[in-house]
Image: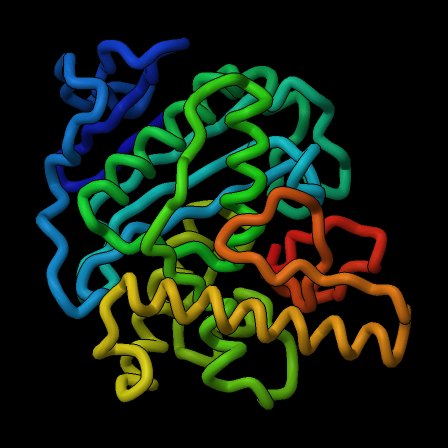
Amino acid sequence: MRRRGPRAQGPSDAADGPRGPIRWGGRPSGGVCSRAVSDPRPSVPSVAPPVLPWHAQLAVFDLETTGVDVATSRVVTAHVGVLDAAGAVVEQWEWLADPGVEIPEGATAVHGVSTEHARAHGRPARQVVGEIVHVLDVLISSGLPLVIYNAAYDLSLLHHEARRHRVPVLADPRPVIDPFVIDKHVDRYRRGKRTLTATSAVYGVELLDAHSAGADAVAAGRVAQALAARYDGVLAELTAHDLHDRQERWCAAQAASFQDYLRRERDPEAVVDGSWPMRSAPVEVLGARHAAGTTKRPAEASRSAA
C-alpha cells in the first residue's frame, strides 16, 4: 500500500490475523519516512477533527475489481483519501492486490490491470483487504464522512472480501455520502446517464482518468461538495448522520420506483434491493458509474455506477 500526502506516511502492513503492530511506511521506491505504531487503531496524523458543515472535510473511497458481482468479484486496486473544503487531497492511500484469481479481459479493459501485472506487482489480497478495512475504520471512527459513488457496490464487495479472507469486516459504516443516490434525488428528472463521468461533468468536476480508483474516489468527493454547494438549502445544513439517514430512505424509494418500472416493462417478478449503504447479495440497479453507462441485465449482479 502506498500512502501519499503532506506527511507521506501510511500503513504498509496490516496485521496478518489478530490486530497487532502496524508499520507505517510509504511508497516502495523510497523517499518516505516510516515509524512503528503499536496501537492497532492509530489516529491519522494529518486529519483534523471533523467540523460542520459535513462537506468541509471528507474521506473518499473507490475500488476497481474483477467484475460486477459483489459476492464473487475481487479487489484489484483501491484508493482511500481525505479531501479538504476546497476539494484538495491532503492524504491518500493506494493499493494493488493480487486477487488470487484471473482478472477477466473485460475488467482489464476497464481499469487497465491484467492478471500478469497483478501477480507480479500486487500484494496478497488478504493483507490488502485488511488494510483497506482498517484505514476506513480509523477515518470513520474519527468522524469523517465517507464518500463513495454507488456505495452499495463498493461496501458490499469489501464486506464479502473481508469475510472471504477472514479479516475484520467494516461494521455499520456511517456516515456515508453517496453522490449517486443524492444526485438521483435532487435532480430526479434529468435525462442522460448517471455515470460518474457524466455526473462529474454536470457539476463541473474534472475527471481525467476514469476507472482509476484514485481519480474516481477524488472526483466522487468533489461531486459531493458540488452537490452541497448547488443544493445548499437541501443538503449543506444537514449533519452527515442526518444525510446518511435520508439517503437510506431515498435509495429505498429509488429502488421501489425502478422495480415498478421493471415489472411494468420487462419482468413482472423483478425485485430490486433498495438497502443502502450495503447489500448482502448481488442486485441490479439502474445506471453505471462511468462512461459505459449501460443498465445491467436483471440476472446480473450490479456495480450500478461501476
3 vs 22: above or below: below
Image x and y of residue 240, in percent: 27, 64
63 vs 266: above or below: above
Q: Is residue 237 left or right of residue 168?
A: left
Q: Residue at x 75, y 71 (%)?
A: 259
Q: How is the image coloured?
A: rainbow
**Which residue is more in the foreground, 64 or 17?**
17
Q: Residue at x 48, y 28 (%)?
A: 96
Q: Residue at x 55, y 25 (%)?
A: 163
- Which part of the image, by quadrant, shows the C terminus? bottom right
Q: Is residue 86 visible?
A: no
Q: Residue at x 48, y 59 (%)?
A: 149
- Which part of the image, by quadrant, shows the N terminus? top left
Image x and y of residue 138, in percent: 25, 35
47 vs 44: above or below: below
**Which residue is more in the foreground, 259 or 191?**
259
Q: Is residue 114 left or right of residue 232?
A: right
Q: In which quadrant of the rendered view does residue 161 lie?
A: top right
Q: In which quadrant of the rendered view does residue 244 lie?
A: bottom left
Image x and y of residue 84, in percent: 19, 58
**Which residue is more in the foreground, 161 or 106?**
161
